Amino acid sequence: MNVLGLNFGHDGAVALLQNGIITRSLSRERINRVKRAMTIDTEHIDMVLNDAGIKVSDIDFIALTATQNYSLVHNNPDILEIIPEPHPGCSAFSSITEILKTTNSTIGFGNDMLKSLYDDTSPSSFHRQLFPEYTRRPRESLRSVGYPNSSVTIPIWSEKLGLDAIAQKNFIDLITNDTVRMGFHVPYTVKLHGRKIPAYAVQHHACHAASSFYLSGFNEAAVLTHDGARATSGVNNGMIYFGSENKLWPLIPNNLRLVHLYEATGQRLGFDLHGAAGKLMGLAPYGSPRFFDRAFVGNHFDMIENGIKSNDISWFEHCMKVAATKTKYGAGWSKPLDLMSPLVVDIASSTQKLFEETILAAVETTHKVFLNMKKPMSNLCYAGGVALNCPTNSRIYRESAFENMYIPADCDDSGLAAGSALFLYHNIFDNPVSTISKPKRGVGSYPYLGGCFSGENVETAIAKFSGQISTQKAGDWDRQAAKDIADNKVIAWFEKHSEIGPRALGHRSLIANPSFEANWERVNDLKKREKWRPFAPAVLKDEVSKFFRGAPLDSPYMLYTAQVVTHKLPAITHVDGSARIQTVGPEVGDFYNMLCHVRDLTGIGVVLNTSFNGPGEPIMERPEEALQFLVTSDLEVLYMDGYRITKV
């Protein structure tokens, strides 16, 4: 069975599931070069199908999803048409209709995104940033179809429950309740290249849950999801689920509003919404959590109980009120804002601590939910934008009652396309998660599921830069790259399939020697970003315990923060002694071989690894983009598909 997954929200993506295995996943931002781009292009779909060697006639089903409150906006309606009606082949239509009647539920639909794009009275510049193509298209050339923004509901989900109250409830009746489990999808029809294909729109957080649980390898797990929805509570903010074999049982909304608070605080500190969360996380170690107040720990209803009406506004007002009583902050707020001022770094640090304590409380609640059902759970699956916060993930790993934890590489919304396909295949169509279908890491497989460019593609790109570059074909390119790194050159590494998710994992990376402290500033200058921004290490998996502690020894997706236990790695050691590690094994490909050669030459199997991109850009996808970066920047060497390339 071939299932095509389409995410029309921000971090738009196309994924392909073939007989239970995700074989392709490509983010739209990598194609149109707009960070966190929304919606889907038909060209984007064609690229994925062509790379997989299949045709539209080979697609059995399509899974649709989007960001909360987004509609399904698509271009070129002559090729792609989304019809909000069930296909005759959608056998689940009658069941979902009965489910809605049985539970007295109605399906609401997201906002019309075309209004956000074209209506001058709309305040949403954010959506226009994510789809700048609208300026080159008349409104009538686009189509907008409603995306189901809600799901089946049951009375307990409408109760105003704080985290402790959730922990005291017993949801045992829900883990055999197919009426609720099957209430998170709506049948549609998609007409693609003239063929009508049965489709299902899958609820946002159900996709997050599926993207984690079905890739975890666990037969059973607690599943926790959360991201930056603007709603105060309910299923669109995040859920607690029970994953068992091929089924996902929704238990209760967690009613968190944490990601919204975190991103809003980053914006108030002057960061663009696109990068606010990541930059705030990097800034936090420069300060102290002097504004932390446990009254803000909890979900929306906990804060209401504590007299806090609007968590993000109230939090910032609280920080400023406390700051006004401290002489160390001087005049306080000033424009332009000094990001390294004591006030700003202490707000960042305090917000990070609030984030960590709240998530730890939510994880504890999740664990208690299963104890209360007399189903103690040792496995936790975790997804949504919240799971990109590495210090928090490490604290869950060290401090929570769960023994095992899984976070997918694309835990942000770029993983929704894959999650929708997995949810459809396993939870709706009842296909088992077999040993064969469980993902294996490696080149051309998870997490390297993006674009792959042949030698012919690379040679064509090189020819376009004739006279500007010097190329050397090298069979031992991994060994030569290691020599350049040992000689303290900054190199770019471009290998086969690109990685999924927002982190560079060794196939589209800028690499430097971590033993030279000056490389911290040097690489920040190369990327034209703030000098205080930290860098991550890639480390050979069998050597991680020599250099790092406090994080899983298997951390392949750069989602955990460890403490550095050596003074030999100053370029990747943050001011608090931490580092966001990526562990590397043979399955990663020639990047692993290069790291082994670095160890042979330097005695240290660690490199500084950061994303191969310029300021405000997505990670590189095509050979032409990598070459353009080389000739227009201070980059010294580009390694690509066996070539060593330098400027003339």
Image (cartoon, rainbow, N blue to C red):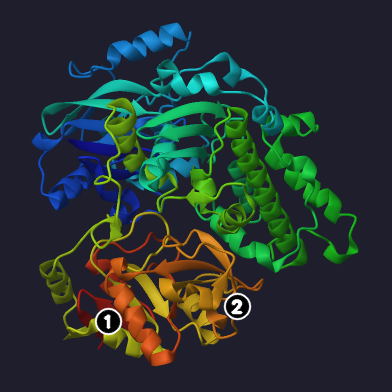
Give the Cα separation between the discs numbered 2 and 1.
28 Å
Picture coordinates of residue 579, whole percent (x, y): 56, 70
Is residue 140 shown left or right of residue 575?
left
Viewer-proximal residue among 225 and 340:
225
Q: In which quarter of the image is residue 335?
A: bottom right
Viewer-proximal residue among 241 and 450:
241
Q: Which residue is drawn at 60% across and 38% down?
A: 367
Q: In which quarter of the image is residue 245?
A: top left
Is residue 392 shown left or right of residue 22?
right
Q: Which residue is drawn at 25% across and 61% down?
A: 497
Q: Are marks 2 and 1 in contact (CB under 8 Å)?
A: no
Residue type at mark 1 is Asp
Picture coordinates of residue 111, whole percent (x, y): 44, 27
Quadrant the C terminus occupies: bottom left
Instruction: Name the residue carrying label 2.
Output: 565
Residue 273: which numbered mark, if any?
A: none
Question: Taking the image as drawn, is residue 580 in sight?
Answer: yes
Q: N-terminal of the two: label 2 or label 1?
A: 1
Secondary structure of residue under mark 1: helix
Q: Quadrant of residue 389?
A: bottom right
| 510 w.r.t. 553: above or below | below
Picture coordinates of residue 360, whole percent (x, y): 65, 46
Quadrant the N terminus occupies: top left
Give the class, few, some or many, for how many residues have Cα within 10 Å of label 2's Cα (few <14, many ≥20).
some
Give the class, few, some or many, for how many residues have Cα within 10 Å of label 1's Cα (few <14, many ≥20).
many
Instruction: Name the residue carrying label 1.
Output: 478
Residue type at mark 2 is Val
Question: Taking the image as drawn, is residue 309 in sight?
Answer: no
